[in-house]
């Protein structure tokens, strides 16, 4: 979702910017007295500045309402499955390769040698979340796997000549049904 | 003290400036070819192998930063010497140290097989898994140190000259006008921009040198270790500040040349001064946006990274881009290659700011960091912004610092550069939309289409750049002599 949003915003604003530049370039050849034009442009600039501020401020505030660093707090009462993930040149060691759909998973990500990036891709090869894997530090990444299937872990930080081969897989399985009292 | 940007006599460039630009042009073309080779490898059109790919990636990254620095420094020095007395000897010393550094880096990469990327993230240079040895990594890092030393000397000379002329860096930034209301206008935009650059880049270079020295010690004395997160902070601080400084040096071409074409002043009024004071602070404190996926970082720094990413776009859009459009609108300007490329550069810089701000948003960075979105945004403001400024400056000099109607080949090259440049950068951005990781020598079959389209665009960009550089190189005598 965020990828699509990023693309649409970028394309739309680039087109608007291109149209503004084309308008100015097409009207550049004519001549007008500068002083009054400059005064008008300065007044418009004040409006342009405040428009940007008014547009960006709510986006800035809203976008910080669900930071990935705080993911653990979004599922109170639902104890996450913890998986230790350690990156090495050029492989991952995961304490478990299986997760449950719908249950939060907390990856404790670190590195045994140099910097790596722990990126999780869904079945459509869409990046669903990432954090850096660093020596001496543990980054806690919490995700909820929404669909059954095989997810891939790719390295997102250049780590040497087999960086692109640094792969692991995680299988997301349906939750085991809890037996009801009647079936006991 | 000057009131407005004055249109100085149309002097030609010094031999030093031309040497900078010729070096920058030659290295640029070579690095562009390396970049094309990388895209062709990813597209599976050629086969150079992963080792060679990552060596070229290392050279392309560091080489392009060097090209930007050379081009930006040439522009700054050329125009700044109208206002202050700069040392030609130190200007040349910087180029000599730069070229010496380039030789060491080339030897380290092509002979020593060092492929640690321009980011040389600690402790990778010492952990090559047998691909390169410590000496190759050391050659690369000593080469960088030499280049940094040269630029530090240049900035110290700029500081000396500015303080000598204006009394202090605060005066050169126009603080008496901005904060004390002493007069309506500050020093010329070139002086203000140069002051901002020397402040931020001196800090940046010293930070870069400190981590390089620590890493060199670690290479040969591994018991001397460095905190990896501290190392990453220092590297990205240095890298971000250094590459940003190149744009703020190059934009001086816009501040100086467009007023001459339009016969309209670019005043360093309070809004302009406030923008540059803001940029001085923002460029220093923005770098944590490179570390948004380092969850171990202090939370306030990561939030600051996003907030400043948003703020940092405002001076660029509201002052420089808007100022350029204002000065051009209904000015009766006669377009030529120089003015056209400078207008394009304003578009490229502003267009690059958009995906950059988008990527600086933490929740978006979570799913786009280190994908092709990142080279997508920085290629937009570097290729279509910063490098277009350098090309515009080259044409300005090659035309004898005056308007010269562009020939058919130049006009064709301009439109090819603009269109293919957009296509090239949007292929990267589309790759980011599709979650393609950056810095991968081998791509999945479903990603090849973007790589192949990007390769075509890259080839067209190189052809256009070749025309620009050859045109400049063939008119060095005119560039040296200036307008008659």
Image (cartoon, helix red, strand yellow):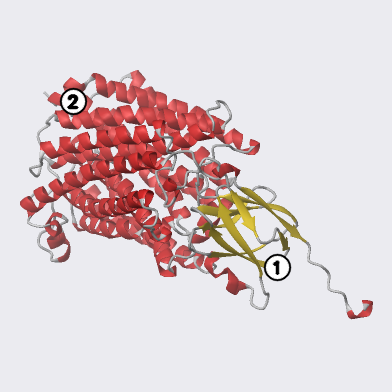
Query: Does residue A175 appear left or right of residue A179 in this picture?
Result: left
Q: Residue B254 is drawn in which quadrant?
A: top left
Q: Are marks 1 and 2 in contact (CB under 8 Å)?
A: no
Secondary structure beneath label 1: loop
> Can residue A69 be seen at all in this image of the molecule?
yes
- Real-space Cα separation, disc 1 to disc 2, in angstroms: 68 Å
| Residue carrying label 2 | B479
Q: Quadrant of the C terminus of chain A?
A: bottom right
Q: Residue at x 90, y 80 (%)?
A: A181
User: Is B80 drawn above or below residue B205 in the view shown?
Assistant: above
Give coordinates of residue B42: x percent, y percent: 55, 34
Disc 2: host chain: B
Q: Locate residue B268, reporting x and y percent.
A: 18, 52
Given residues B138 and B271, the one toward you in this image is: B138
B404 vs B136, left or right, is left
Q: In terms of depth relative to the viewer, which is nearer, B8 or A103? A: A103
Q: Residues within 10 Å of mark 1 (few under 14, many from 20)?
A: some
Say which mark, if any, is on residue B396. Answer: none
- Measured from the top left, where is residue B77 in percent x and y? 17, 39
Q: Position of residue A20 (x, y in %)?
A: 39, 44
Callout in the foreground (1, 2): 1
- Residue found at x 35% / y 19%: B408
Q: Which element is circle 2 on?
A: helix
Q: Which residue is mark 1?
A: A103
Q: Is residue B339 above or below residue A57?
A: above
Where B181 sits versus B85, above or below?
below
* Callouts 1 and 2 on one subunit: no
């Amino acid at each position: 979702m965020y990828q699509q949003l990023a693309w649409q915003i970028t394309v739309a604003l680039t087109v608007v910017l291109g149209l503004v530049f084309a308008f100015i370039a097409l009207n550049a050849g004519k001549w007008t007295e500068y002083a009054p034009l400059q005064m008008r442009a300065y007044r418009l600039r004040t409006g342009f500045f405040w428009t940007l501020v008014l547009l960006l401020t709510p986006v800035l505030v809203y976008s910080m309402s669900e930071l990935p660093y705080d993911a653990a707090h979004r599922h109170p009462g639902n104890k996450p499955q913890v998986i230790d993930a350690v990156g090495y040149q050029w492989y991952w060691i995961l304490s478990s390769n299986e997760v449950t759909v719908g249950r939060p998973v907390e990856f404790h990500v670190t590195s045994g040698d140099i910097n790596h990036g722990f990126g999780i891709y869904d079945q459509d090869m869409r990046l669903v979340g990432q954090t850096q894997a660093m020596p001496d530090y543990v980054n806690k990444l919490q995700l909820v796997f929404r669909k059954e299937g095989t997810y891939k872990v790719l390295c997102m930080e250049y780590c040497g000549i087999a960086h692109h081969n640094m792969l692991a897989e995680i299988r997301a399985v349906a939750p085991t049904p809890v037996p009801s009292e009647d079936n006991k | 003290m000057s009131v407005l940007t004055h249109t100085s006599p149309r002097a030609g460039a010094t031999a030093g400036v031309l040497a900078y630009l010729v070096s920058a042009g030659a290295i640029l073309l070579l690095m562009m070819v390396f970049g094309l080779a990388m895209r062709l490898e990813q597209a599976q059109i050629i086969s150079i192998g992963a080792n060679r790919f990552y060596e070229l990636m290392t050279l392309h990254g560091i080489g392009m930063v060097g090209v930007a620095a050379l081009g930006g420094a040439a522009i700054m020095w050329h125009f700044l010497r109208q206002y202050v007395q700069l040392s030609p000897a130190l200007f040349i010393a910087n180029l000599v140290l730069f070229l010496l550094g380039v030789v060491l880096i080339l030897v380290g990469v092509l002979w020593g097989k060092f492929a640690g990327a321009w980011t040389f993230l600690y402790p990778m240079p010492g952990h090559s898994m047998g691909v390169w040895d410590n000496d190759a990594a050391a050659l690369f890092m000593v080469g960088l140190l030499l280049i940094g030393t040269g630029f530090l000397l240049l900035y110290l000379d700029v500081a000396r000259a500015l303080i000598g002329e204006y009394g202090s860096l605060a005066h050169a930034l126009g603080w008496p006008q901005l904060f004390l209301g002493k007069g309506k206008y500050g020093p010329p935009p070139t002086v203000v921009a140069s002051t901002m650059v020397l402040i931020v880049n001196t800090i940046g270079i010293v930070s870069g040198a400190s981590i390089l020295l620590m890493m060199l010690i670690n290479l040969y004395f591994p018991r001397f270790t460095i905190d990896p997160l501290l190392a990453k902070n220092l590297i990205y601080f240095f890298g971000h500040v250094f590459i940003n400084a190149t744009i703020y040096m190059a934009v001086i071409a816009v501040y100086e040349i467009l007023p001459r074409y339009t016969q309209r002043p670019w005043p360093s009024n309070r809004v302009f001064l406030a923008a540059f004071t803001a940029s001085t602070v923002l460029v220093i404190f923005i770098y944590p946006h490179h570390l948004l996926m380092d969850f171990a970082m202090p939370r306030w720094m990561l939030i600051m990274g996003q907030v400043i990413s948003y703020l940092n776009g405002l001076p660029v859009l509201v002052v420089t881009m808007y100022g350029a459009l204002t000065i051009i609108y209904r000015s009766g300007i006669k377009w030529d290659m120089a003015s056209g490329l400078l207008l394009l550069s304003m578009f490229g810089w502003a267009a690059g700011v958009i995906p950059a701000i988008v990527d600086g948003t933490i929740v978006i960075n979570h799913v786009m960091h280190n994908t092709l979105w990142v080279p997508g945004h920085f290629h937009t403001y570097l290729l279509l912004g910063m490098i277009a400024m350098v090309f515009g400056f080259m044409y300005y000099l090659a035309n004898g610092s005056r308007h010269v109607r562009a020939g058919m080949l130049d006009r064709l090259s301009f439109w090819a550069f603009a269109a293919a440049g957009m296509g090239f950068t949007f292929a990267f951005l589309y790759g980011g939309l599709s979650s393609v990781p950056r810095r991968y020598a081998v791509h999945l079959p479903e990603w090849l289409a973007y790589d192949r389209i990007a390769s075509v665009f890259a080839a067209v960009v190189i052809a256009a750049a070749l025309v620009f550089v050859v045109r400049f190189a063939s008119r060095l005598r005119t560039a040296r002599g200036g307008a008659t």
